Amino acid sequence: MIDTSTIRIEKTSQSRINELDEDNIPFGKLYSDHMFIADYIDGEWQDLRIVPYQNMSVSPAMTTLHYAITIFEGLKAYKNAAGEVVSFRPEANASRLNVSAERMCIPQVPESLFMDGLTELLKLDSAWVPSKPGTALYVRPFVFGTDEYIGVRPSNNYRFMIITCPVGSYYTKPVRVKIETKFSRAFEGGTGYAKAGGNYAASLYPARLAQQQGFDQLIWTDGKSHEFIEESGTMNVMFMIDGVLRTAPTSGTILKGITRDSVLTIARDWGMQVEEAPVKVSEVVAAAKEGRLQEAFGVGTAATIAPIATIGFEDELFDLPAADDSFFSKKVLKELDAIRTGEVEDQRGWVYKI
Ligand SMILES: *Cc1c(COP(=O)(O)O)cnc(C)c1O
């Protein structure tokens, strides 16, 4: 049993909060004053602590540097209309971290350890939670093996950490995406459903090729036939075709997005037709050609909703209508924002007050 009431706190003597300019937040460069750490040693999580954000030294033989024994989560903290710090469905991140952990032979992180670490850290660094519309404090919990061991085997020791960084709006412009039909992100029996470091390393090269062709992001297709849409790099994808909201089911090859679940839940509550079933690339392409593809957008914590402006497939480009306030993607984004800020009642218990 871990006693999470014993988090040791060492406060920084030199806050960097004056470096935070809410109107101009550099993405992923400025980290808040503190970080949470817990170490897994001798089969137990121990030495829970919050310390000033700083570099750490590791062994050159640390297993994770060689074999990517590492998993992560991503969530956000916001200021609600009353100025309180809230987070969105953090328990879902805690439980997904453990789904990823199992696949990577990483020990489970008890939900209380995750939630208490998160809560104490956000309390201490609450001044780092920006309040301008579109801004948030991005929270990155992660776990990695710390053994000094060059052989391939699960690590015996691990570190769980939480770091945070303020962020502005992620994608301001609608994105251009390419449907990828050569490279694969995931395949049956693989690790696609885990938020595991190696998945992202493997996606960099195909993503770079797409960027060289003028795209912002990829839409991955299934690793076997490349006939079915899977998801984007760090977002699930949804299509509105003939008035039906379509998205791929979360099989073993797709990351089970919390934003995805929230959007589908709201759509169903609004009485919309929702189909969680394999989406054929050919169907999307045909719908785009015939003007029946009304909307396409990515859903994920980083951007919340990222409207897609252009889809590239083989040698063709399909432009989508620009999203206006009548679009589902706009309405659902507004609803999610209103739930977080407290303007709309949180009927589903999604908002967690720090
Ligand atoms: C994190 C992630 C998502 C989105 O998940 P959220 O819980 O909505 O942030 C989707 N796909 C991939 C591959 C991801 O890594």
Image (cartoon, rainbow, N blue to C red):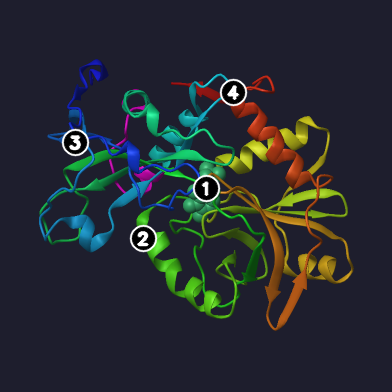
> Do callouts 2 and 3 mark residues in contact (Cβ within 8 Å)?
no
Task: Check if residue 159 falls in the magenta segment.
Answer: no
**N-term mark: 1 or 4:** 4
Which secondary structure lies at badge 3? strand
Amino acid at circle 4 = Ala
> Do callouts 4 and 2 mark residues in contact (Cβ within 8 Å)?
no
User: Residue 81, which numbered label?
Assistant: 4
Amino acid at circle 3 = Tyr
Task: Give the side of residue 22 with respect to residue 175, left or right.
Answer: left
**N-term mark: 3 or 4:** 3
Q: Quadrant of residue 5?
A: top left
User: Residue 302, which numbered label?
Assistant: 1
Amino acid at circle 2 = Gly
User: Dot 1: few (<14), some (14–19), or many (≥20) neighbours within 10 Å?
Assistant: many
Comparing 186 with 146, the one in front is 146
Q: CA distance from mark 2 to mark 3?
A: 21 Å
Which one is closest to the eye, mark 2 or mark 1? 1
Where, quadrant-wise, is the N terminus in this rendering?
A: top left
Q: CA distance from mark 2 to mark 1?
A: 19 Å
Which secondary structure lies at badge 1? loop
**N-term mark: 1 or 3:** 3
Residue 191: x and y, percent?
Answer: 43, 56
* Mark 1 Cβ and ligand 1 under 8 Å apart: yes
Residue at 55% over, 75% down: 210
Which secondary structure lies at badge 4? loop
Report the magenta residues as a range. Answer: 100-114
User: Height in image: 232 above or below 264?
Assistant: below
Which one is closest to the eye, mark 3 or mark 4? 4
Task: Check if residue 110 falls in the magenta segment.
Answer: yes
> Do callouts 2 and 1 mark residues in contact (Cβ within 8 Å)?
no
